[in-house]
Amino acid sequence: MVNGYLAETLQEALAIRARENVVPYSGGTDLMIEPDEEATYLFIHKIPELKTINEDPEYLRIGAACTFTELLEDARVPGILKDAVAQIAAPAIRNLGTVGGNICNGSPKADSALILFATDAKLRLASTRGERTIPISEFYLGRKKTALQPDELLIEILMSNTGLSNYYYKKVGARNALAISRVSFAGILQVEGGKIINCMTAFGAISDVIIRHKEIDALLVGKTLDEAKTVKKVYLGAYDQAIAPIKGRISAEYRKTVCMNLLRDFLETNGI
Amino acid sequence: MEKISQSTKKKDHEEKISGRALYVDDHVMEDMLHGRLLRSVKAKARLVDIILPDLPSGYFVVDKNDVTGVNRVHIVLDDTPVYAEDTVEYVGEPILMVVGPEMKEVERILNAIVVVYEEQEPILDMRAAETVFFHYNYAKGDIETAFKEADRVFVETFQTGYQEQAYLETQGIIAYPHNGRMTVRGSMQCPYYVHGAIAKALGCKNQDVQVVQDVTGGGFGGKEAFPSILACQVAVAAQKANKPVKVIFERREDMEFTSKRHPSISTYKVAVKSGEITAMDIEVLFNSGAYTTLSPVVLQRGLICASGVYRIENLRVTGRAVKTNTVPTGAYRGFGAPQTFFAVEMMMDHIATALGVDSLELKERCMVKQGDATSTSGKYHFHVPLPEMVARIDQLADYRAKRKNYQHQTGRYRKGIGLSIFFHGCGFTGSGERDIIKAVAKLRKNADDTVEVLASNTDIGQGLKTTFCKIVADTLGIPYEQVLIENPDTDRVPDSGPTVASRSLMTVGGLLQRAAVRLKQEWKSGEVQVIEERFVEPDFVIPFNLKEFRGDAYPTYSWSVNAIEVEVDILTATTKILGAWGIFDVGVPIDLNIIQGQMQGGLLQGIGYASMEQMDYNDQGIIRNNSFSDYIIPTAVDVPHLVTEILNNPYTHGPYGAKGAGELPLVGAAPAYVEAVENALSVSIHKIPFTPEDTMRVLQEANQ
Amino acid sequence: MMIEFTLNGQTVESAAKANTRLLDVLRHEFPLTGVKCGCKEGECGACSVILDGKLVNSCMIALGFVAGGNITTIEGYRETERFAVLDKAYAAVSAVQCGFCIPGMILASECILAKNPNPSEGEIRDGISGNLCRCTGYNAIVEAIHIAAREGKGLW
């Protein structure tokens, strides 16, 4: 085909990626909004390794070219990710759009990426030079800027197999479908034996990249819920300092207030 | 239900559901060129120079110098240039068009053109406007005394924003010269408006212009006057190139640069004595944008509706439509009425709160009834079914109980319910129908005894082909299938006026009914017969004097009561719509399904107007909400519980008792929605759209 | 260099560039004008087609993506028995107004019923939530899909 390659195996795709200046095309729903007529696409949606979901003792391994619909239809995908994916656009877009594309587009509004941030997911990147697996937080360098090298492909997303069941998720859009996130928030609180063993939160659509402050969340870890209450003010205060939404169509003030409201509600619904 | 109201398969169902219907962009002609407009990027500037690149053969640049007639689009006052002359008055004003065989090359040429502007200071804010395009005022009673004697005087100001029609099919026109004539076809509501405009711009005789309406993917007013502008531009291009030229707008181009609902600011001063409203002094300001287009008539309707459905003995209404350096605003379903109905309904609500009574109670006390005077000292000649509508909506929505229960809530989710009462004046304002339009409609009986409807009114989705044919078939006593109707072609149909103002069915449908009665009497099987009918004003009408705004602005009114229930999440300030109920009197429905479809669609558009449809320009005069992702309209999951009912209230002078329907359902949704939000949060609201950001602001103010 | 795919049951090929919008190829090359263009941003659903059994926006697809794929547009679907049921159901409640969203809406209806022959109102509304309609307020369309589910027993 002219201006395109249809890769059938990962090996073939990586070889083309190494050799030519191509744009990886997974679901296409971000690329086609403003298509570049000069672009040569590398279609990767038929590569078996990128289309499967596997489980190992530690991780759920999601092929990067799995569509949102495929995630929704797989029983192993955790609820927090399904909740977010179910609210993306509408069925026809969910049938095309992929989790890998959502990540590689580099947008802070990406609804699946928010969840992967909040859950400290890892990304497996490959090239003919070899492979590397990095935390998603290291992948995002800035607005629309990622750590993906010109010869690399994102091939797999690794989500923890455990500890994700007690979650809080809220997407604030302009309507109930076909909505782009104006603010989104995800939080996970793991409590075992009366103690918080893990707290992970992330905020989407308010800055150049998704916001994840492990150091602030760590304030709650190791504490009982009652002890957590004593640092609640400090915790919220730290986020109040840390969150500074950038200007957009929707005012920074509004988005800041919603972020803080949801964060507080996340604590309170967990008894903190 | 009357027999005529029983639903029939729509005349246009088959071609549309099968995908066979051809909209303007689906037509391809031999040697056809594609055009795209070069638009001003400045809100106000003098055009100093336009530097063109070398044009490849077969490509043309078309501008003001190519206009062989008058470089003005005939609308009302004819101030809109076909192509800009020495100045540009808003961002997006068309300067020239590039046409050629390949769109990509057309775009390349457009990008290579350099326009040198001498920028001038634009006026964007309507409050700062210097040019008043239209200024009307009218009064009745003794307003000075009423205010002097009042116990309390309330003054409040209300604002409404743009609303974009957001029809699914963007604007599009094809023009092609042939045998010394110019044929123009495309997406439009009013073929004869386009016809008159083309003749003026090309400077040719009326008979040298033919206009054909293609299947039209929605209009809602947006294809009333605007297609005249685009058609002139395309026809001038086609004349120059001597080839067919097609122009189809991109969605962003359509949203940003075509006419939309007038933003408004209305100030109400209301006198109350002994708990009764004794006077209203109302000032209305409409943002007309850079040219006048339809602003005079939009403003007139807005002003006539300014006192709502209430009996106000002492009334003064002043209105201005002013020029700003922004996109010209124009017709949109409701035509000025949604703006002032929002204001008056909210005003009544706020006064009720201040008086310590429920809003509905105050409204019920002031509601007009049959025989009462209208705002313009005309008369409500017919039964006003508001009391039974209020009773029914209360039953459907459990309004009164909920309204009370929802006061003073705490907690994250807070519910509220609101109600609005409103009318829509049926047909043209004032004597326009009698003095300007002078509608003519025809029936042609063919030799095979089929009967064809010949009228210039267009089916833009509202079901006019079906309702016209039903009236004719039933009156003649022949099968519906035996009555035929095509899309209007000015070579074949008389000028029965535009498809606007909720007039087509009531007025032109009435002419067709009369024609059918005559045809039945004169029926000669196997012969060709043509029956023509002309508009005659009903004799009960008190003639309207536009200078004084006095008399019957409308022969009759369609009535409605809406209730909307919401739930506000105070953490995110987002509002969920739990239910929307509307009860509507549009006379006898000529087809119940069609009327229900109109009511449901209109009500949802009104809810969008109130809640999510936000459009603004920035300090450069550039509209940024120009796509379906930035200008948000309701989807199927936003108002799942939307209930509409029809109240049968036959109109003696409408065909089968029908009156105006299309615009009514949009008019009153906004105040019902906003009242609901007020009810949920115990706040006072003065603007639409009322968005989550606005909600957050009032929540924070309430906290302080 | 041709891109081959199945279109309404026929094997076809296109010489267009792989990065061309499928929507443009369908409308201009084949020319299937039942596929409507409303926004080119995946926001309106007027250009919906069925690709390998799933509803997709043809404006959001580059031609190369469908190589080897199976596409149904309204022009193919209207020849089916299932269409006849939907046609009748939409007619019964006059769910078609301006008609511009309708080809996409019909294909969305098919995908809803293919997934669940007895869909709930919520499933129906979600299934058409990417197909904007400015005319109807959606009630009649939802009702039509309910009717089709009732009348089309065994077809889905």
Image: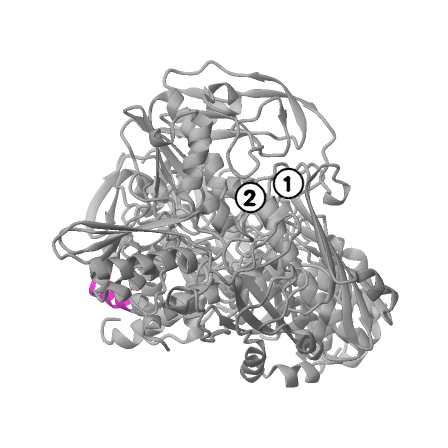
Please say whether residue B507 is one of the residues in the magenta stretch.
Answer: no
Against B115, residue B137 (above or below) is: below
Dot 1: chain letter:
B
Q: Residue furthest front?
A: B539
* Quarter of the image with the N terminus of chain B in it: bottom left
Q: Where is residue B124 in the image (x, y as percent from the top left)?
A: 71, 39
Q: Which residue lies furthest to the top in this view?
A: B54
Identify the residue position indicated by label 1 in the image: B289
Against C35, residue B145 (above or below) is: below
Residue closer to the observer: B626 or A271: B626
**Badge 1 or badge 2: first in the primary sequence:** 2
Residue pictured at 38% horizontal, 44% vertical: B495
Name the secondary structure under disc 1.
strand
Against B39, residue A239 (above or below) is: below
Check disc 2: other Cα within 10 Å, few if <14, some if 14-19, many if 20+: many
Number of marks in the image? 2
Segment tinted magenta in the rendering: C78-88
Q: Where is residue A93 in the image (x, y as percent from the top left)?
A: 44, 56
* Rendered image: mark on residue B259: 2
